[in-house]
Every structure is written in C-alpha cells, then in structure tokens.
Amino acid sequence: MVNESIAANCLRDRGASQRSAIERLLNPRSVAIAGISATAGSLASTVLDNLERFAFAGEIHLLHPKQAAIRGRPCVKQTSELPDDVDCVVLAIPATAVLDAVKGCAERGVGGIVIFSAGFAELGADGRAVQDEIAAIARSNNIAIEGPNCLGFVNDADGVALTFAVAEPRPLSGPGIAVISQSGAMAAVVRAALDSRDLGVSISISTGNEAANGMEDFIEHVLKSSQTRAIAMIVEHIRRPREFLELARRAKARGIVLIMLHPGRSRAARESARTHTGALAGDYDVMRAIVEREGVMVVDTLEELIDISDCVMRCAQRPFGGVAILGESGAYKAIALDYCETLGVVLPQPEGEAAARLNAVAPGFIVASNPLDLTAQALVNPGLYTRALQDLMAHPDCGSLLVTIILSSSQMATRKMPPVLEALRHWSKKRTVVFAMLGDETRIPDEIVRAVREAGVPFFRSPERALRAIARYARWADLSGRNSAVPKDIAASRRLPVGVIPEHAAKDILERAGLQMPSRRLVADVDAAAAAARVIGYPVALKIQSAALPHKTDVGGVILNLADEEELRSGWETLYRNIAAAAEVPIDGVLVERISGAGLELILGARNDPEWGPVLVVGLGGIFAETLRDVRVLPAAATRDEIKFALLGLSAAALLGPFRGKPARDVDAIASAVDVLGSFIRAHPEVSEIDINPLIAFAKGEGVLALDALISCR
C-alpha cells in the first residue's frame, strides 16, 4: 500500500511544469540514474554514456549507496534524497530494491520511472503482487512507468536516450516512424533495422511488463507528435482492447499507419507470451479481425514488419489494384508468376495499343505480358526502361510497380542503374514503386542504394521479400477502403434467458430476427409427430430437444430421412431408446423438421468476446471447418461487401462458384444470413455464443437454410 506520507506529498505544489507524466518520462528535462557504478559497461553506466553521447542538456543525478561521486558527478544514496521534481528516474537495480526506490520517487515528485529490472509478473504470483504495488504507487502519485523488465527508450525526435543498449544519435530530417514493442530486444532490433535503411525513427519504446502504463498510453503520446508518420509495433498482448481500437481510429483519421506484429497464433507462442511478459493471451483470430477493420496493418513476420515499414515511410503513393513487374529474365518471370499465385497477387495484363507497342519494341525478344521480360535488350537500348514502363503501367488496375534488375557486379550496377533511376523517379510520384535487385548480397556502390531510396523507392535485395511487402501493403489498402463504412447503431433487444437455449427455441428466435429456417413442429408424442409430418411434408427428421443435450447427435438424438409415417413411428422408438441409454435428462419434446434439398454446407457462428466484443465466424462446413480450419473471423459490424470479400477469401472458395457440375451458390443469401446474425449478436450482449451448423447454401437465387441452431447466454 502507498504510505500516508507519499499520498500527502503528492498534494504539494512542487512547481513542476504542467507537462503530463508520460511527457516527463519520454522527454525529460532532468534525469536520475540508480544503480550507477564506476565499472564501464554496466547497465546504468551505459545509460549515462548514451546521455552524454546525445549531449543531453538537462540535469543528471546519480545514485549510489556508498560512493559520493562517480565520473566527477555527485551521488545521493537513495531516491528519497533526490531534489524535488526530477522528470525521470532510471532504475538499473535488483528487483528486490525497486519497490522502495519507487516509494522514494513518489516522495520527491518524480514524473516518470524507467525500470530495467526483471523478476516481477513474468515470474508468477509473488512477482505480480510486487508489480501491482508499484502500479498502485504510480497511479496515486501521477507517475508514468516504463517497465519493469524493459530496455528503456530512445527518443531521437527530442534527443534523449534512456536505455542500456548502446544508442547513437540519429537526428530526424522529417517525420519519422515510431517503434513500440513489449519486447525490449525486438525494439532494439527494429530500430537498428530501420536505421540501416535510412528511415528516421522518431522514438523507440520498450514497454516491458506494463505495470502502470501500457502500449496504449505510449501510442496515445506518439499520436500527438507531428514528428511521426507511422508506428511499428511488436505486441504480445493488447491489455486494453477498447482503448486500443479508439487509438487505431484516431491514427487512421490522422493518416498515421499502425503496423503490428502480434505473436500468438500458435499455442506455444501464447504460452511464451505468458512467461515472457506476464500477459494473458487472447484469441488471435478475433483480435486480428477486429483491429484490421479499424485500419491496423497486421503482419506475420519480423521481416514483413521491417519491409512494410520501409514501404509505408518511403512510398509517396499507397497501392491499389494489381502489381506490374518489370524484369530482365524469362526464368525470373516464371518464378514471379509462381510466387504471385501463392500470394494472391493480381497481375493486370497489357491490353490494346499498349500491348501492341510492347510487342513492337523487339519482335521475337520482348512479348507484351506482366511480368514483362526486357531480356538483354535494355543493355543495348537503355531507354527501354522508361518506354516499356509507360505501356506496362497503362493498365488502370496497375497500382503498384516492382522493378527487378540483375545486378551481378558493381560494374554492371553502375552501367545499368542511371536509366533505371530515371524511370523510378518518374513512377514513384504516381504509383507505389519498389525496387529489388537480383544478386542478393552482391556488392554494389552505396550511392546507388541511396539514390534509389532518395527517389522514394524501397530498395530490396530479395524480390520475394519485395513482392510479399507489396502484397501485404496492397491488401491493407484494399481492406482500409472496404472497411470505411461506419456501422449503424443497434438498439439492445429484450434479454434472452440465461443458459443454453435448445434448437427449437433458438430457431424461433433467429427466424424472427430474419434467418431462414426449415418448416418444423415441436411435438410431445408420436401421434403428434405423424400429424406434423403430414402438414410439413416428408421426408422429415426427428430431433430430441433438451437444453442438457446441446450435441444431440452424439447420443443418437437425431433420426434423419424418414420417408413416411411407418418410418417415422419406427424412428420415434429408436430415438427414445437412444436417449434412454445415454442419460436421464429433462426433455422439451421432439422437433419434427422437413428435410431440405441438397446444398453446400457452411458453418456460421457468433460470439461476444469478453475483450473484443461481438464477432462472427463463417466458413465451409464438414472437413473444411473441422480439419482444415477454413473459416474467416469477422467483426459483427462487417458490411455485406466485407462478408462477401471474406467468403471469397476462403481456401475452398471455388466451391461457392460453379464446380464440377454443381451450380454457383447463393453468395448474396449467405452474406445476408451472416449480416443478420451480426446485427443479432450486437443487439444481445448477454449472448455468449451462437452456433449454426450447418447452414445450407442452395443454388444462386434459391437462398439458404439453417438446419441446426444453438444459443448460449451468460
């Protein structure tokens, strides 16, 4: 608990500026370093080295329990002896000493604390308890905390580095990219990688265990800066989802791109996150669906995070449509075609007069196509690069350009690149343009790499990485355009009863909401079942109805394809024998339901996620859902266009169209059913889960039917 003296001290007017605690932490005017020693290379000594290297102009205070001075700077013994209102204190001390040091900081009116020490929530309950006490002190005294278990930060925009990693000043020449990572090591890696590509990093922050201030607080701070155009993030757990989504909306409105790598798709990765940062991992698929709809670009690898950051920061234009590829090798053309198919990259082909002009450039050598192979003709006629691109890019759907040039030696690079650079400078003002050399680590003059980058074109040594970056960037741009619709508000409906709602009642509820259901009757005896079947028509199914039997097929509670009354009466006896052998449970009755015609089975579901809110799941049924996990997760507010886009992105989407004699399915009706379920789950926050399995899709124009339905409510 926070002692009374600390609470009293926080009420004093200390004469501190009106800057927020986060501002005092990340852009301090005075700094104290605890854990300093005369030994070179210690964590605290590296912090002091960084401050001196950055020519930090503010006051620097040192703490040492025994020495009066280090490096000619006076020392105090503990944080409670510091002057009032130090902006930021760095704690490079054992974990056992951190709590007392934080209490001393609170007494002196410190604005922010960077805690390098590990040994808190990531180690279990005891460490969590101490971390929680530190957080309570910080909240009670308006202190911002970075960490514990963090690497610190490097603020190039304001010229200060409080990190135990060696940092070199990198002054900004314009708005840069911010790096925010829950992993300290990865923050350093990404900053170094972006620096190596001559991309200005405005600030790099390692958030660690996030005891008092999380990633959301640091994103909010960065969004206020005019010196940041994009934020590259490595996130193991989003602790405040609703706040994160609001920040994503604000970033999108300001034109700041959020690029996020989120480990956690695998079970092993989720377990690693718990042991690494003390995080409780959430559902990755749900998270990804929701954040992508709000404009966050989610990537799968560290390479993609760095590569796409390069594209976002350097390219003046955002991608649209398909990609045009200009190369000099027929073999690479085939390689690119294979990889584009894997990535789902669209390659618009030259048409009309543009195609005719390309075919006339070097008949017998150059053929109008995308990818376009210039062969060796450009060595003889360097003007071909500009001329060919004019015709290749004439197609209105070519929104991106990848130029792949063979640079097998420094001499070849010097010979080829001047006309290529001229073409790059021209097209980078009109399209997303990326350059990739074929030659991997072949040494070429540094000035050529710089010239490509200064033209507003990312430089890659791997055409595969370049294509992957373009594909991801273009997909994000497409999703951002599709997801621009603001969902309409849904009024809450009458609350449903707590517990499992069995099929017959669930179908009545969902049918009233607008979902299509088969004809059916709930009956109590076999004579009533026969009468119902005569009304709705054979063939029919008999389904036992009980809230205690949500998976009725597992106990023989479903009898299918009863063609007449004789089969119905026999099926009734079989049904009740099965149930009697399985369990004694309360029975609501038996559902007599008309068997529908043949169609394509889909699975449709919805849930109110405790962290992210209402979401939908849709995919093809049977083995596609159960074995191949060929499903898509969507926000419940997804539009019908977004739903259809997701359906066509399924691995087995070909089954929705004409396939081996089967007619095209009613995709519009499927999208309508998903849309209805989305509105329903948004109107019923008490619903924990809805399962519709299967949803049968008939031929185009013939609609869909929900053959089974189950609702569970909190």
Image (tube, grey):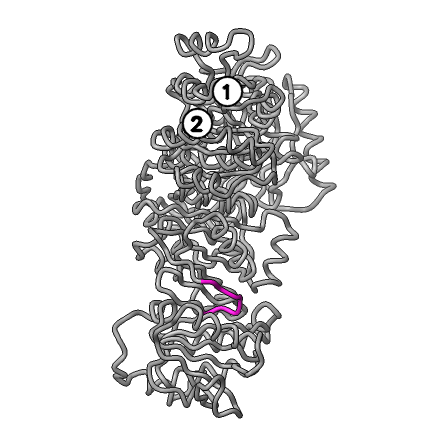
Q: Quadrant of the N terminus?
A: bottom left
In the rendered image, is residue 124 in sight?
yes
> Given contact means CB atoms under 8 Å apart, are the residues at marks 1 and 2 in contact?
yes
Mark closest to the chain's N terminus, 1 or 2: 1
Res. 361 mark: none
Residue 286 point in image, percent of width and height: 50, 45
The residues colored magenta run 162-168
Q: Secondary structure at mark 1?
A: helix
126 or 456, nearer to the observer: 456
Residue type, mark 1 in image: Ala
- Residue shown at 41% from the left, 32% from the top: 432
Local crowd size for mark 2, using a 10 Å CA cut-off: few (<14), some (14–19), many (≥20): some
Residue 667 point in image, percent of width and height: 47, 22
- Horizontal side of 502 relative to 4 (left or right) equals right
- Residue shown at 43% from the left, 37% from the top: 457
192 or 91, nearer to the observer: 192
Q: Is residue 614 above or below residue 572?
A: below
Mark 2 lies on residue: 419
687 or 5, nearer to the observer: 5
Q: Secondary structure at mark 2?
A: helix
Residue type, mark 2 in image: Pro
- Is residue 163 on the magenta stretch? yes
Residue 387 point in image, percent of width and height: 41, 18
Mark 1 lies on residue: 378
- Residue shown at 62% from the left, 53% from the top: 269
